Amino acid sequence: MKYSVKSIITTSLIAMAAAFAPAESMADVITIEPLFEYPVAPEELKSLPEKSDYLVQHFWDNMDFRSNGAVDQNALNDAFKIYTVPFQWAQKELVLKSVDNLLEQIAKKPTLQIQFMKAAEEALYGPRAEIWIDEIYVKFLENFIKNKKMSAIRKKRYQEQLKQIRNSTVGNIAPSFTFSTPTGNPGKFEPIGVLTVIEFGDPDCDDCRHSKLKMETDVTFSSLVDKGLINVLFIVPDPVEGWQTKLTGYPSNWVIGASDDVSDIYDLRLSPSFYVMGKDGKIMAKNINVKEAMAIAVDAANK
């Protein structure tokens, strides 16, 4: 985790969280002057959940919300990322309350709303986010989109994100989508009836090729595919010309294709990005790696 050196020193919980992070050289750490003094959990709180509860509730106590002007965006991004670390261990209701209080603090400050929206995207949604928490990020999206002072242009990308997240919420029925096969035939994914693993990827992507190899060579997984107990799709989102010629050599019992509009429907944040859908058509997991997808599918198929 690339938190600033000052942040790690001043926040006891962050030091604990950093202990679980991969080792990094000092040259990799960017030092950012904090916007305010971050809270430190009292010594009498011994457990990680207790410390997390305290920090979630008190993180923004020293932030000056009185000004209507802009703050340093990099410093705010750093603060927000640190703010989200204890979300993993704090009580859910305290996290939700803390976020609601924060949104109330910035409700009448459009400049801060824009900056906090960017910070939330960086920490909870974007490719550099340490954790993805859709329920929290949706709060920021909804708050931003309903603000009448924000221009339609500013809202557009966030409206698209909100639509994709809502379409792809774990536990909901997966949206159907159309695609074309390499031979030019039309196809349509309907998410009901068969346990399904979908890999959204690019045939030129090294990680996509490795994922294909893992699924093909895993005896347990591939045997369930052969028996028809797991359905596998490899779908190329937003294909470029000539994509058909790059999809040779895929297993004959996989469904292969490309879709021009699936990236507008589904929440795709990785390449490859894996989804697992149950027999009931509901999304069991999303934006996971191939190992996780196979484990979830195999476990569900064996029940």
Image (tube, helix red, strand yellow):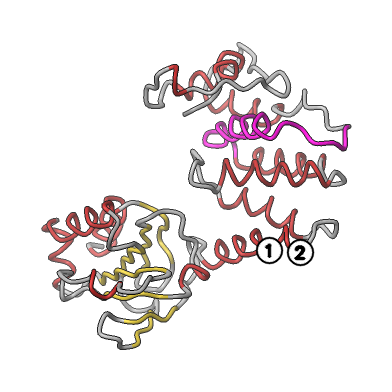
Q: Magenta part of the protein: which range?
A: 67-91
Check if residue 117 falls in the magenta segment: no
Which of the 4 image quarters holds residue 151? bottom right
Instruction: Name the residue carrying label 1.
Output: 156
Quarter of the image with the C terminus in it: bottom left
Instruction: Name the residue carrying label 2.
Output: 152
Where is residue 19 drawn, in percent x and y? 42, 20
Query: What is the distance, in whole Å, between disc 2 and disc 1 at their CAs?
Result: 6 Å
Q: Would you place residue 51 above or below residue 245 in this image? A: above
Q: The residue tagged with tag 1: helix, strand or loop?
A: helix
* Callout 2 amino acid: Ala
Where is residue 79 drawn, in percent x and y? 65, 29
Task: Judge left or right: residue 79 versus residue 242.
Answer: right
CB under 8 Å between discs 2 and 1: yes
Q: Residues within 10 Å of mark 2 (few under 14, many from 20)?
A: few
Q: Farthest front residue?
A: 241
* Callout 1 amino acid: Lys
Q: The residue tagged with tag 2: helix, strand or loop?
A: helix
At 41% across and 81% down in the image, what residue appears?
Answer: 178
Which of the 4 image quarters holds residue 214? bottom left
Task: Judge left or right: residue 195 versus residue 166.
Answer: left
Where is residue 61 drawn, in percent x and y? 77, 25
Q: Nearer the viewer, residue 257 or 172?
A: 257
At 66% across and 38% down in the image, what residue appears?
Answer: 94
